[in-house]
């Protein structure tokens, strides 16, 4: 080694330093690495430059021997990581085992994946899933599942189009489209408010609800799956918690499609990066114990105060943005035009969040819990009603019925912890109130 030491020394230091500099560059350029390893870019750059500079210290025996050993270790480690990173990507190994994880996730909490219309998606069908829906989702997320230990085990079935209907369904007079508040994938079919609505009205009702969707998706569902010779009422359920945001997001995707011809893609992407997997494992190991179930308020019931999860707080200063109101007007005009073509009555049904229904019956755990909740405009129902009146869409707000029934009986009407949706009792209240409105003498709007 003594005779060739200068060359070996130089080669080792340039190779090791260059390898570290190359890794540092990759950590700032490859998206799957940037997210998790970008903070390491500067240390690796510094160490790489030090090793390159140390190439000129071959005459100092002690330093040279140590730095050469360090270079061999660096080359061995970087070579191993590079081979692993390339190898796992080539074979397509999914470190997250996403297909298996997805099979454990109840359909209610999955994003729809089957393309429909320009930029929208529906669920695959026919399919079914059996289990305790909310409890299983808590397990998937790593939360304690004790609050839902007594949740009934149900079988959730979807028709050939991916919706919760009997298959085949008799000709329907009412089509109800919406997000998770219409799908209600944690309830039995008999408990759905659309099923109960049909019983109340004595008419066939088609459920076109899919979670993780917005109003433009719902209009698409009505156009593709809600049209029928007996259609009388076309209903879109508008959830105040996120539908304005979903509206602008879907409108943006639609405009992008019209400009580029490219639609969103929800093909399952495997996580094949060894380095990203190592960082995620490191992060999960550092989080320690199981996170507590999110609880930030208490609400009065006939059994006394019970803990609940609230995602929003009512805010008198909050207002919809001009952009969202403009997009809302565009959507409502398109909805009204569709209903007119079909000879049906268009309805926008306002679905309130827990915080609006529980107002006056709950208290926040701490002021910080209230401030950390998302602001929700107190005046939002009036804003939506005005937009509906301007476009000829009938408006109905479910808030008064839900507030009156749940307050008088001292019940929730919603799932208390983690989940934001109606329970079976709340769905029954919605069905009764909506049936009363649909059966009433025809008016353009109602508040």
Image (cartoon, grey):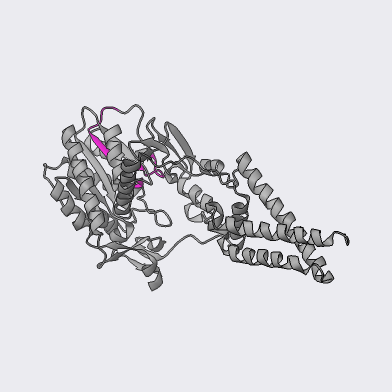
Range shown magenta? 170-188
Q: Residue at x 85, y 59 (%)?
A: 4
Residue 63 vs 190, above or below: the answer is below
Whether 183 is among the magenta residues is yes
| Residue 150 seen anywhere in this rendered image of the structure | no
Task: Give coordinates of residue 367: x percent, y percent.
Answer: 38, 73
Task: Give coordinates of residue 186: x percent, y percent.
Answer: 41, 45
Q: Which residue is drawn at 59% across and 66% down?
A: 42
Q: Which residue is drawn at 22% across and 38% down?
A: 234
Q: Residue at x 56, y 55 (%)?
A: 33
In the displayed structure image, the side of residue 74 where residue 414 appears, left or right:
left
| Residue 132 seen anywhere in this rendered image of the structure | yes
Residue 439 vs 276, above or below: the answer is above
Q: Toward the viewer: 21 or 266?
A: 21
Q: Which residue lies furthest to the right in this view?
A: 2
Quadrant of res 185: top left
In the displayed structure image, the side of residue 273 where residue 326 appears, left or right:
left
Q: Toward the viewer: 386 or 55?
A: 55
Quarter of the figure that contains the N terminus: bottom right
Task: Give coordinates of residue 294: x percent, y percent.
Answer: 45, 61
Residue 230 vs 317, above or below: the answer is above
In the displayed structure image, the side of residue 172 where residue 125 appears, left or right:
right
Task: Give coordinates of residue 220: x percent, y percent.
Answer: 29, 38
Residue 368 vs 218, above or below: the answer is below
Q: How many labels does the image show?
A: 0
């Amino acid at each position: 080694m003594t005779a060739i030491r200068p060359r070996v020394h130089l080669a080792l230091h340039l190779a090791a330093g260059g390898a570290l500099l190359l890794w540092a560059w990759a950590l700032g350029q490859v998206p799957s690495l940037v997210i998790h390893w970008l903070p390491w870019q500067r240390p690796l750059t510094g160490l790489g430059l030090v090793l390159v500079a140390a190439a000129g210290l071959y005459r100092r025996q002690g330093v040279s021997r140590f730095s050469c050993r360090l270079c061999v270790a660096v080359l061995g480690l970087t070579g191993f990581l590079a081979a692993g990173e390339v190898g796992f990507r080539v074979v397509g190994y999914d470190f997250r085992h996403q297909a298996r994880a997805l099979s454990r996730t109840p359909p209610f909490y999955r994003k729809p994946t089957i393309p429909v219309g320009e930029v929208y998606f529906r669920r695959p069908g026919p399919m079914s899933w059996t289990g305790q829906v909310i409890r299983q989702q808590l397990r998937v997320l790593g939360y304690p599942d004790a609050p839902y230990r007594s949740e009934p085990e149900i079988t959730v079935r979807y028709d050939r189009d991916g919706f919760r209907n009997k298959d085949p369904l008799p000709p329907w007079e009412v089509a109800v489209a919406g997000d998770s508040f219409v799908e209600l994938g944690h309830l039995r079919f008999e408990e759905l408010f659309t099923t109960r609505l049909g019983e109340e009205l004595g008419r066939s009702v088609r459920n076109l609800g899919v979670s993780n969707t917005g109003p433009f998706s719902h209009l698409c569902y009505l156009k593709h799956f809600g049209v029928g010779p007996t259609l009388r009422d076309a209903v879109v359920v508008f959830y105040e918690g996120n539908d304005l945001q979903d509206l602008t997001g879907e409108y943006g995707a639609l405009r992008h499609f019209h400009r580029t011809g490219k639609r969103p893609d929800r093909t399952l992407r495997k996580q094949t990066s060894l380095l990203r997997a190592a960082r995620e494992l490191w992060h999960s190991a550092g989080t320690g114990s199981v996170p507590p179930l999110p609880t930030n308020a208490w609400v009065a019931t006939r059994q006394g105060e019970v803990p609940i999860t609230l995602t929003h707080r009512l805010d008198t200063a909050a207002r919809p943005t001009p952009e969202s109101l403009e997009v809302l007007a565009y959507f409502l005009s398109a909805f009204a035009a569709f209903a007119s073509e079909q000879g049906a009555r268009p309805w926008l049904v306002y679905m309130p969040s827990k915080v609006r229904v529980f107002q006056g019956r709950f208290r926040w755990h701490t002021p910080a819990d209230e401030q950390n909740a998302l602001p929700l405009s107190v005046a939002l129902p009036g804003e939506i009603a005005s937009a509906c009146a301007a476009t000829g869409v009938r408006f109905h707000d479910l808030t008064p019925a839900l507030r009156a029934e749940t307050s008088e009986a001292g019940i929730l009407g919603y799932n208390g912890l983690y989940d934001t949706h109606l329970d079976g009792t709340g769905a029954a209240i919605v069905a009764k109130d909506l049936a009363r409105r649909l059966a009433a003498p025809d008016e353009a709007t109602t508040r």
